[in-house]
Image: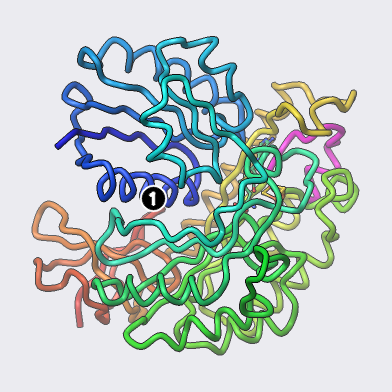
Amino acid sequence: MKKLYIQTLGCAMNVRDSEHIIAELGQKEDYQLTQDINEADLIIINTCSVREKPVSKLFSELGSFKLKKKPGAKIGVAGCTASHLGKEIIKRAPYVDFVLGARNVSKITQVVHKKHAVEIDTNYDESTYVFGDYRSNPYKAYINISIGCDKKCTFCIVPVTRGEEISIPSRLIIQEVKKAVESGAKEVTLLGQNVNNYGRRFSAQEEGAKNFTELLQEVSKVKGLERIRFTSPHPLHMDDEFLHEFATNSKICKQIHVPLQSGSTRILKEMKRGYSKEWFLNRCEKIRALVPDVAISTDIIVGFPGESEEDFLETMDVVEKVRFDTIFSFKYSPRPHTPAASYANQVPSEVASKRLQILQERHKQIQLEQMQKQVGKVVKVYFEELKSGGQVAGRADDGRLVYAKGSEELLGKIVDVKVTKAYLTKLEGEVV
Ligand code: SAH
Ligand code: F3S
C-alpha cells in the first residue's frame, strides 16, 4: 500500500473535497492515509485563495514539502489556488507533479499518473459523480449539495475558482445522507457556497428538489438522521418560507450563518450583495423571533474599497443590534480577477487593521455575554470527542462546544447536559 499525506486549508467545502480525494485514492489506487509526511509516497495540499495569506502559505509549504519528502514521492496541489494559478504553480515550483483545480476532484485518479498534469476546467461538471466513501469524523458527515457560485460579489474570487453554480440532484444527496446514517452518523452538514439558492440549475437530464426548503424537507425524512446543519446560506435568499422551515423542522439545528459582510447599504451595493442593511436586520429579527434560542454567526469584511468611518459605524450598529454569537471577521484582501481589486479608493491597511481590532474587541464582549446566558440551561449535546481529564466534548444543537465529565460510552450519543460554566468559546456542564 502507498501512503498519502494531505494538508487542507480553507473552508468546509475544501475539507469535503479532501475527503473525496482520500476516498478515491484509497479505493481505486491503493493509497492509505498517513500523518507522517516523511513516509508519504504522495503529498497533496488542498488550497484556499479567498484571501492572500493562504496563497503565500502555499509556496512556503511547497518548499518545506520538497525538503521533507522521501525520494520519488510526488507532490500535488489541489483546490482554489490550483484553479486560478494553474500552470503558474509548476513554473514557480517545478518539483510539483500535478495541479488539480476545485470542481475537478473526480480526476484525481488520472492526474496522479500524469507528470505535470494541470486539470483546472472551472466548467467541468462533476455534479453527478458519485465519489468513494470516506469521512474524517465517524459521527457526522459533510455532504455537498451544490458546486460553484453564481453571485458575483465584487470582492470574492470563489466564482473564478469554483465556476458556475450547479446543484447536485436531490436523489444523489439523499443517497449520500442514507449512506452516512447507515455508517453511524446522526448529523449531516449540507454544503455549498450559496446553499439556499439550491435548485438553480442541474446537470443535463437531471432534476431535484425545487428549492432549498424542499430539499431540507426531503433530507429530514431520512430515518435515523437526527440533526441537519447547512453552510453557507445567503441573506438575500432567506425568504419567509425558508425561515419557517428552519424554525419548525425539529431536525434542523438552531444555528444559522447569516453572512453580513458590511452593515452599510452603500458598501453592500458596491459589493453587489443584493440586500440592504434593513433587509439584513429584518431577517435576523425574524430568525430570533421565530427561534429564541438560535445562535447566529456571520462573516464581516472591514476596509472594503471606499469604506468610510460612517460605513464602518453602520457595521458596528448591526453588531450591536443582532448580537452575533460568532463573527468571522476579515480585513479586505484584494484578489486577482475581482472587480474590487482595481477600485481606486482602497482603504489604507492601518485603517482597516484598526477597524478590525475595534470590531473584534467589541464582539468578544458580546460573545462572552451570549455564552454566559447559557448557564443554567439544559442543552442536547452530541458527544464526539474524548478529552483529557476524564472529559468528553460535543456540540449543542445551536453549535456551541460543550465539555462534560464522561467516558467513551457517551461518544456518538445525544445527551441532556446542564450548563454550569461559560467561557468565551466553550461551555462546561453536567450530564443530567
Ligand atoms: N459563500 C461563501 C463565501 C466564501 S468566502 C460562504 O458564505 O462561505 C468566505 C468569507 O470570506 C466571505 O463570506 C467573506 O467574508 C470572506 N472573504 C471573501 N473574499 C474576501 C476578500 N477578498 N477579502 C477578505 N475577506 C474575504
Ligand atoms: Fe463569494 Fe459572494 Fe459567492 S462571497 S462565494 S461570490 S455569494
| Above/below status of 11 relative to 210 | above
Q: Give percent across and percent down for residue 421.
A: 30, 65
Q: The N terminus is located in which quarter?
A: top left
| Above/below status of 340 relative to 274 | above
- 242 vs 60, left or right, is right
Report the residue at 69% width, 41% height from top: 301
Residue range in magenta is 301-314
Q: Give percent across and percent down for residue 405.
A: 14, 66
Secondary structure, mark 1, is: helix
Determine which quarter of the picture holds residue 209: bottom right
| Above/below status of 238 relative to 130 | below
Q: Give percent across and percent down for residue 11.
A: 50, 46
Q: Which residue position holds label 1? A: 20
* Residue 310 is a magenta residue: yes
Residue 300 in view of the camera: yes
User: Total number of numbered labels?
Assistant: 1
